Amino acid sequence: MKSLFKLSMGLVALALAQQASAASYTVRVTGATAFRAATHKAIVNFLGGNASTGIPVRMAHSGNTVGGSASTSGGTSTLAEGSNYATYIGTNGSDTYTIQATFTGSVEGIRDVGQAIAIPFIPASEVPAGTGFDLAKRLGQATSTTAPTNATEIAVANMAFSDVAKSSTDYATVDLNTPDVAGIIPFIWVANRGSTLTNITPLQARALLTNGVIRKNLITGLLADDPELTPATGGWAVLTGRNSLSGTRVATLAETQHGVFTSVQQYKLGTTSGTKPGSNPQITSLELWPNTGAASTGDDALLGNGGYTSGSGVSAAMGWQGASVNLFFKDEDANTVPLKTGVKVDLVGYAGVSDASTAVDATNLGTRLSYNGVSYVGQADNAKVIYGQYSFWSNELLYTKGTLSTGDTTFKTALLTFFNTQSNIGSSAVSRDSMKVNRQTDGALIGF
């Protein structure tokens, strides 16, 4: 009887010890969208779910398309992986985790974590009860660049992903811990529907970044593409791109040696005619950033220095042809001034792998450009990145701030481990340990 009593008391003591050791943690992640899909999958995996199906993780998310209504429905992991806003609740071991993610951009992430700026998250109260991923709640989202109305919890994140080092941003002096390399992010130059461009070199890219508009023959080397000598067939290459808070833009400026703090000249879609994909979609005007109705502030306040807030803006612009385009800018009195009228345009931009794929899909029908004579389409060409042949890439960094809690450290370690398997991070990135070459910082020489 005594032995049975001792065993019973021992089990009670063990249960009490296990209860005492259990803890609850809230982890908040922000920053670059480049690792967004992989991070969603890593969170699901961390909380005991299947990274492919999501089961059985509880979550609420904004969805990967605009205009969704708030509802409880049978979501899929693909839908969740495109979300800029998501909150998960689950357990890892004996600990309970609430993991909130708001993906904004590389530079914003460095700024917000470094300066402890509070940003919107979906509150835990929005996460439905239950144990199945099929109970995941998709929240309404007005546009792809604003928080859903349900992201009402304003809090400071303690981790940020960035496509670029903080030294390449305006927030180089913020106090952050030494970053971990989460993976490698390749980028791709793209051109619009109907473009005959096939390749761009670093110097040609720098000419576009500096001027915004250059003669097409300066890229192709063909007399027939010179708009001045052969106006019937010639045309202009025009640059579009991202705003100054974009890691994709910073990586592009570093790679081309344009200078990460040097302003650029970029255009945005003004007016179009027809519809995508099949009803003669045409650009009728392009406007130098910023334009009336889309004013920029801070670093983007310089004429032409603005840009799209997401890669989806660049990829969508690639779906329009440029047979007869009017180019405009605003003078110092905000008057619309025509730069060129009725000219042929090849619109050129830069994007991550996922957005580049959208630029060339069946709706947009744009084209990927080789970079310095080397083509890259995504995962099928990863060896070109791994061995140093294709140089348009940067390190994806995970920044943290201050002393991390036990929960933060456990979560961060699990993320980095998950990311180092290529199948886990998908086609938009290259796993860290697969690389045979490296670079110390953005745009630096590639070596071993």
Image (cartoon, grey):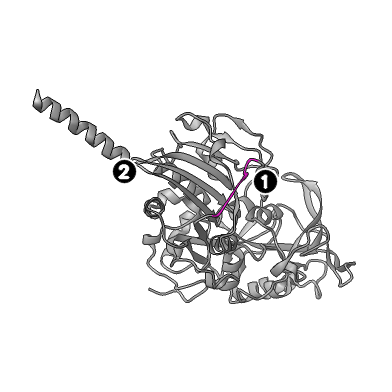
Q: Quadrant of the N terminus?
A: top left
Question: Which residue was labeled with disc 1?
Answer: 363
Q: Which residues make up the magenta segment?
A: 150-156
Disc 2 marks a residue whose amino acid type is Ser
Q: Which residue corresponds to the image point at 46% horizontal and 30% vertical from the top-left?
A: 132
Q: Is residue 306 visible?
A: yes
Instruction: Please indicate whether residue 140 sits to the left or right of residue 408 in the image.
Output: right
Disc 1 marks a residue whose amino acid type is Thr
Q: Is residue 360 visible?
A: no
Can you tell which quarter of the image residue 180 is in? Answer: bottom left
Q: Which residue corresponds to the image point at 42% horizontal and 70% vertical from the top-left?
A: 438
- Against 30, residue 7 (above or below) is above
Q: Position of residue 168 (x, y in %)?
A: 56, 72
Question: Which residue was labeled with disc 2?
Answer: 21
Sequence-wise, which precedes: disc 1 or disc 2? 2
Mark 1–mark 2 Cα distance, whole angstroms, equals: 54 Å
Q: Quadrant of the C terminus?
A: bottom left
Residue 285 has which mark?
A: none
Q: Is residue 17 magenta?
A: no
Instruction: Please indicate whether residue 108 sits to the left or right of residue 404 in the image.
Output: right
Instruction: Please indicate whether residue 279 sits to the left or right of residue 24 in the image.
Output: right
Q: Secondary structure at mark 2?
A: helix
- Against 156, residue 19 (above or below) is above
Q: Position of residue 276 (x, y in %)?
A: 73, 45
Q: Nearer the viewer, mark 1 or mark 2?
A: 2
Q: Which residue corresponds to the image point at 58% horizontal and 70% vertical from the top-left?
A: 171
Give the camera-side residue of 2 and 238: 2
Q: Position of residue 45 (x, y in %)?
A: 40, 43
